[in-house]
Every structure is written in C-alpha cells, then in structure tokens.
Image (cartoon, grey):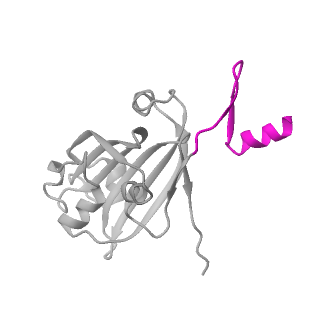
Amino acid sequence: MRKALGDLIQEGLVYTVQGKGTFVAPKKLRSTWVQQSGGLYADMTERGFRVTMKVLEVGIILVEEHIQKELGLSDGDQVIKLVRLRFVDDKPFDIVTNYLPARLFPGLEKEDFASNSLYSLMRGKYNARFARGVRLVDAGACPVDEARLLQIKPNSPILITHSTMYDQDDQALEHGIVHQRSDVAEVVINVIPH
C-alpha cells in the first residue's frame, strides 16, 4: 500500500498534507509547443478552455540590457512592454511579460489586451510573419508579489519560460517571459524524427 501511494505521489496524481491526509491532485493543463506559434490563447481556446487576461502593465520603455540582447536591439532603442495575468477557466494560470521592438509595432501599446491575443494582433494588424521561435524552460520559486496574483504560496515552484519569436529574415519580433503555476500546468514537447 505504501509503495502504491508513493508511486501515485511520484506521478503527481495525489499529494499529502502532513496531519491532514492524502488528496487527489488536480489535473494539470498541458501546453503543447511543437510547430505552432499561436501562443497560450490559441492553444487553450482550441481545446475548449476559456482564456481571460488582466493587463498589469503596458507602455513604451527604453530597452533593458537582457532584453536588448534577446531582440538584437541597440542602446537607446525602445520596446513595448506588456505584462498580463492570464486565467484559464477563471483560475490564475500564469504571468506573461512580452517585449516587442516599438519601431516594428507603432501604437500596439494602445490595443485592448484584456480581450485580444497578442500574436493575433501582431499578425492581423502589423502583418508579422513568424518563421521560427526558441524557447527555454527552467524552474524557479515564485516571488511574493506574483504568488499573490497567482493565488499560490510564496516560493512555490513555477515553470519559467523564455521565448523569442523570429520572422523569415531572422529578425526578432517578440521576447516573452512566462511564470507559470507548476501545480496546474505541464509542458508537452512532441519529438518529430528526421
């Protein structure tokens, strides 16, 4: 019995709370990443989930050093910075921060991001053509201010994703940093043999 329970805990199907007992873990939502650049909104709505967003910050800033490198920009260049709290079926799911070269997307900061997909706006209004993207996934501890927004305990484990999307000329169009609740999300990476 102990071994079976241990196996279930290892697989993430149940969890224990000391002094209270063993409980069934909530089913995690999968993010699938291969050969699609539609983003979370397109992925989740396609599968029947309702995605809503709350804009936490939007504006034009001077590019910060770490973002300058990711977007291939120069000192003094401006970027649009967009920070959103995203919900899936009314539950906090992640906090995403996007950076875009301001010269490529004039006026984008004035759009309604509470009800529009960023990638859809980039494609539809600005004719952005994504050719490829690079994603790096890491694990980390959730900062106190973000934990409050995500409704989890401070220092809870989170998935941290850095991604950069490029066009056909290999120009960086967008760099995103996502802090995702690891208790409700998991990443599926499909492998395509050559």
Residue 5 location, quadrant: top right
Near-viewer residue (12 or 136): 12
Q: Tell me what residue is drawn at x 19 percent, y 48 percent.
A: 112
Residue 118 location, quadrant: bottom left
Report whether 11 appears left or right of 41: right
Can residue 123 be found in the magenta stretch?
no
Q: Which residues are magenta?
A: 1-27
**Can you name the residue that lies furthest to the bottom here?**
194
Residue 25, position as x, y percentages in the image: 63, 38
Quarter of the picture holding the N terminus? top right
Residue 68, position as x, y percentages in the image: 31, 54
Q: Tell me what residue is drawn at x 14 percent, y 49 percent.
A: 110
Number of callouts: 0
Can residue 12 be found in the magenta stretch?
yes
Near-viewer residue (61 or 5): 5
Q: Tell me what residue is drawn at x 17 percent, y 51 percent.
A: 111
**Can you name the residue that lies furthest to the top here?**
19
Q: Tell me what residue is drawn at x 61 percent, y 78 percent.
A: 193
Residue 158, position as x, y percentages in the image: 52, 40
Residue 155, position as x, y percentages in the image: 53, 30
